[in-house]
Amino acid sequence: MTLQAVLVVAAALFAVGLYGALSQQVVVMVMMGLELMLNAVILAAGALWWFLSPQPSGQVLLLVVVAAMTVEMAMGFAVATLVHRERGSDMTDSATDLSR
């Protein structure tokens, strides 16, 4: 694959994630859209590092970013689950005020 093809795939992935994040009202679906957008950025960064300087240091940094993103998304899902258990709703409008 060429750099342009990988960047086109990353742009398409980002566009799908942006549409999903902006068009949905369910918290889990918004988070899935954000996850797609983050994955598109990671794919583009990895492709740029691979094609510009094929050394493993860039890919190792991306693995660290993926690990941090995984922890962040797990915490987000935990908050979404807590809001659903407390309020009985999974809509973004009901999660605007998290403090009681």
Image: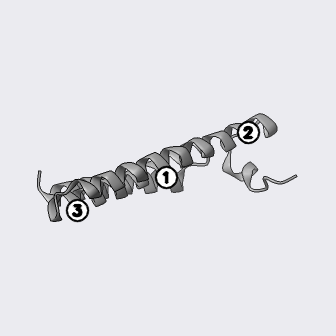
- CA neighbours of label 2 inside 10 A, class few (<14), some (14 to 19), many (20+): few
- CA neighbours of label 3 inside 10 A, class few (<14), some (14 to 19), many (20+): some
Nearest the eye: 40 or 62: 62
Identity of the residue drawn at 68% across and 37% down: 81
Residue at the right extreme? 100
Identity of the residue drawn at 28% across and 53% down: 59
Q: Amino acid at mark 3?
A: Leu
Q: Amino acid at mark 1?
A: Leu
Coloration of the structure image = one colour
For residue 85, what is the image quadrant? top right
For residue 42, what is the image quadrant? bottom left
On the question of residue 26 being in view, the answer is no
Answer above or below: position of 87 versus 62: above
Q: Amino acid at mark 2?
A: Leu
- CA neighbours of label 1 inside 10 A, class few (<14), some (14 to 19), many (20+): many
Instruction: Identify the mark nearer the N-term, 3 or 1.
Output: 1
Whole-percent x and y of residue 46?
Answer: 27, 56
In the image, which disc is placed on residue 19?
A: none
Q: Do tag 3 and tag 1 residues touch (Cβ < 8 Å)? A: no
Camera-nearest label, 3 or 1? 3
On the question of residue 84 being in view, the answer is yes
Along the horizontal axis of the image, is 82 left or right of 71?
right
Whole-percent x and y of residue 51?
Answer: 15, 60
In the image, which disc is placed on residue 48?
A: 3
In the image, which disc is placed on residue 34?
A: 1
Residue that badge 2 annotates: 82
